[in-house]
Amino acid sequence: MKKLFYAPLVVFFLLLFAFNSNVFAYTDGLLQDQSIYYGKDISNSEGSTGKWTDNDEATSLPLTVSSMAWYTFQGTTTIDSFKIKSNSSLLVTFYNENNEVISTYTHNSSITSVENLPAPVANVHTVAFKNTASTGMTIYELDVYNNNIVPNIPSAPTQLTALSNASSVDLTWQTGPASSTYTVKRSTSPGGPYDTIKSGIKLLSYSDSTVTPGKKYYYVVSGVNVTGESINSNEASVFMYYPGLLRGKAIHLGTSLGDTSAADVVKWTDGIDATSSPLAAYLNGWYEFNDSVTVKALELKTNGSLDITFYDSSKNQIGSYKYSFTTGDLGKLIILDAPIENVKYISFNNKTIGMTVYEFDVLSTIDFDQNPSEPNPEPEPQPEPSGDRAILTITMITGLEKEYDLSIEEIDAFLDWYDAKENGTGSAKFGFDKHNNNKGPFSKRTDYVIFDKILTFEVSEYTAE
């Protein structure tokens, strides 16, 4: 009976350990559970700690500027690899029994790193980790090995996002476990093929300044370590804006052309995807040019449709364009069927619910033959959907899509909340009742979305059987 009792108990603790282990297991290292000294140099200890070698990434200790942490072995050993988790770079130094430096290695990563040294270092009596930054730092784990610890091939990075800046594309992503560095790849076609534009990246971000206005780019990122390279991350696309006639100008906001009752907006014309401002229903964004201009094309990024109107110096309408937003529009260049001349005023508004405008600009003198872009003709009107239910698809700013099957009443409640929040009132979050999707012992489950995390949403109505 005792054997029957102990066997399940052992299995239980093994499973418990497996589910609670860190992404990187710091086991079997030469420093595991040892006390590490710290101070200004290896001959002047200011104290010791076991937090850096306890195989627990939740524990940490700061290391001040120009200070070092070190461990001295009983004899000498050979070190060929290490694992480090810190929030800044470290200089790894190896000393012999006479405290002479026999080798150094610069660890540049600010994430958990598992690395083999370029060559094994023999006769190591002391190994030290020095803070070479100009500020203090935090160390979570340290260890060294003498058996060539080689990590698994990294998992793919996740949540890659790409945002257009005035003259660059800013990329951010989440780490792929076991990655030491990252490689950024780019294409001008969805799905590739991709060209590598930067490798050896230590951070979880990169700014690509080798971009051309008027083009749409598609990016992926892979993780790399000494074993190999991961598969690619999700693809992120972005449009690079030309600096048009409105770049950096303040757009007036009011109830009609010429009305300046609301505050001016500059975020719509800065060429930066990450900045935006709401446009409430039936309000107009408008601008008056100093001299009449010719408009050949539009650039915009929004999460809703716009009515764009052009006026001459007498405020007579001389042209218009209806932009119909579709899910996935992440900034675009729209070449008009024919140039509109003698434009003195331009205005844009939406006649549905409140919306967000990220970029709006007009172009006059750009050479489109040298920078081809597919024209976007005015879309044919689509019939109004009807039904008693709808699929609501919400795209977050991270690229994550959330989908809800809701009644029309629930859709209306969401639209009313979004419209009110767009106008500056109401709660910052909206909850969706998950109905019969309850799991476990819960009596009710509610999924919340945050207003300023929403990029776009789409409503597809249908009639239930």
Image (spheres, rainbow, N blue to C red):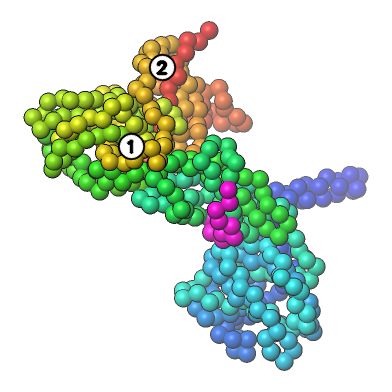
227 in relation to 342, above or below: below
49 in relation to 452, above or below: below
SS at badge 1: strand
State which mark lies toward you, 1 or 2. Answer: 1
Q: Which residue, given by chain and number where applicable, does mark 2 sit on?
A: 408
Q: Residues within 10 Å of mark 2 (few under 14, many from 20)?
A: some
Left or right: where does residue 131 sit relative to residue 395? right
Q: What residue is at 90 percent from the left and 48 percent from the top?
A: 2
Q: Is residue 201 magenta?
A: yes
Please report the bounds of the magenta region as a residue range.
195-204
Residue 30 falls in which quadrant of the image?
bottom right
Residue 44 falls in which quadrant of the image?
bottom right
Residue 306: % across, % down: 29, 28
Residue 319: % across, % down: 21, 25
Residue 73: % across, % down: 75, 81
Kind of residue at disc 1 = Glu
Q: What residue is at 86 percent from the left and 47 percent from the top?
A: 7
**Figure quadrant of the N terminus:** top right
- The numbered disc on residue 157 is none
Q: What residue is at 31 percent from the left and 29 percent from the top?
A: 336
229 in relation to 148, above or below: above
Q: Is residue 34 magenta?
A: no
Query: Which residue extends farthest bottom?
Result: 98
Visible residue check, residue 415: no
Query: Which residue extends farthest front?
Result: 369
Q: Which residue, given by chain and number where applicable, does mark 1 sit on?
A: 299
Q: What residue is at 69 percent from the left and 89 percent from the top?
A: 99
Q: Earlier in the sequence, mark 1 or mark 2?
A: 1
SS at badge 2: helix
